[in-house]
Every structure is written in structure tokens, then in C-alpha cells.
Amino acid sequence: MSELVTPSNEDFSLAGQTAIVTGGAKGIGQAIADGLARAGARLVIADLAGAEEAATRYPDGIGVTADVSDPGDIDAMVDTAVEATGRVDVLVNNAGMFTSIPMRSFDEIPVEEWRAVNEINVIGTFLGCRAVVPHMRRQGGGRILNLTSGTIFRGVPLLLHYVASKGAVLALTRALARELGDDNILVNSVAPGFTISDGVKENPAGVDFEHVSAISIAARTLKRDLFPEDLVAAAVFLCGPGAAFVTGQTIVIDGGQYFH
């Protein structure tokens, strides 16, 4: 019988590591960045706006203005991290398009909007992975954490392009985990339910958050709103040494709305 092993602080320590968080200037990205910083990581915050200011929250934080759908911006983001710290250990692909998307029937979605959602949510995730992997390979390993969505398991209507894009991120996570296993690069994802983030509250023209929140709470086992801070512990775990034998997996964090 194997000896019982109890978790220690070392299972969650990211001391000496460099973590990049896209879309990290506010909301879910900022909450995850805060958690990684508490675990000891040095943070590189990438966002379309506010990255430099957000980076001042962290010791030796680095802010990079970047559009995740632009290969040049993503390559520059990773180059900045490597030039400043010598390494990239963690990438959190959090940047995404959601809060500004109006809810409507699938046959009313403009093709241009479909392309824009997938440019950011899918291609942005792909570009981030492509940029960090060569550095992680040279280091002997790393962690990639992708943000997908609980909507892909529940078949949520009126956001078909968003749901399809997040389904692609889940598939990307699984396939890339297989491809990078021999390099000791672990690829996982978290799938939040509807989260009361800054972006949701700041975009009244997008998702009707009060209506969607009420529907979500009614369907959950735990009857309350979901906040960015609820995602942090799982994210930090998947990025840390305690998850050294976990790859290709998705943790659904939605208060028991969907059992995965």
C-alpha cells in the first residue's frame, strides 16, 4: 500500500517562474494573475488597454499592449517576457470576445462578427500557444491554461459563434496536450459558468447580465453568482507543480450547473 502524501505549499508554489496572462488587465484575467502572483510567479500582463497600469499591481510586473489575434503582437509579447526574465513557464490564454456580443438567433449573426469572435477566441489561443512552446521546450517543460466555457456543455442558444469558438478551444486543448506530452508541456483548461466580471458589467449592449445571471443561479446547485475569484484556485493548481500529472483536462467551475 502506497504511503499517504499530503499536499504542501510547494505543490502550489510558482516561485522563480514567469507567467503570461492575456486579457489580464481586469476581470477574470486579473483575478488569475493575482493568484499566480500570490503563488510567487512574476507576471507579464497582456491586454488591448491598461496592461502597463495593471502590471504595477505585481512586483516586477511587466505590461504589454497586445492584440491576441495579431501574430506580431503575440510574438512581441513573448519576446518581452523572455528578454526581461529569461523564461516563460506559464501561459494563461484568457483574452476573449464575449461581453460585447449581442445575443441573437444564429441566422442573424453577421459573418464578420462570427469571424471576429473566432479570430480572438480561437486563433488568439493558437497564436499564444505557438509563441511560447519553443521556449518551454528549451526549458524542459511548461504549463498552458486555456479559458473555455461551460456553455459548450449545455448548448446555450443565441450565442452560437461564441459557443462554437469555445468548443474549438476545448478541442485545441485536448489535441495540443497529446502533441506536447513528450515535451513535458501540460495543456489544460477551465470552463467557467456565467461570471460576473468587470467586462460583463461594463457592456450593457452585450449580454443581459441580470437576466442571464438569474437563469444561471436557478440552474446551479450552489445558488449564487459566480465571480472571477471563484476560478483562481483551480487555475493556479493547473499551472503549478501539484498538477504535474494532469494534462488535456477541463475543470468546469459553475457552482454545479453542469456535472462534467
Image: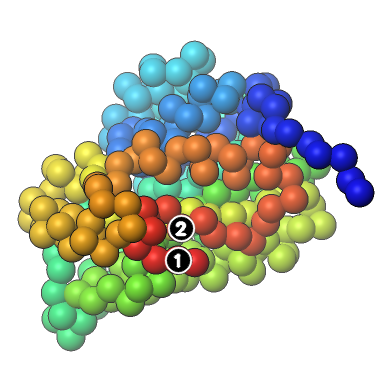
**Residue at the spot 60% in from the left edge and 44% down from the top edge:** 238
Marks 2 and 1, the one that precedes in the sequence: 2
User: Which residue type carries mark 1?
Assistant: Phe
Disc 1: which residue? 259
Mark 2: secondary structure: strand
Q: Position of residue 63 (x, y in %)?
A: 42, 27
Residue furthest to the left in view is: 205
Q: Residue at x 45, y 38 (%)?
A: 232
Circle 1 Cα neighbour tier, 10 Å, few/some/many (<14 / 14–19 / ≥20): few
Residue 8, relative to residue 32: is it above or below? above
Label 1 element class: loop
Q: Is residue 203 above or below residue 58?
A: below
For residue 18, side relative to residue 47 (left or right): right
* C-alpha span from label 2 to label 1: 8 Å
| Residue that mark 2 sits on | 252
Q: Position of residue 100 (x, y in %)?
A: 18, 55
In the image: residue 251, left or right of residue 119: right
| Among the 4 quarters of the image, the one containing residue 215 | bottom left
Asked if one can make out residue 194 in the rendered structure from this viewpoint, the answer is yes
CB under 8 Å between discs 2 and 1: yes
Q: Residue furthest bottom?
A: 107
Q: Residue at x 38, y 48 (%)?
A: 95
Which residue occupies the foreground of this view, 110 or 2? 2
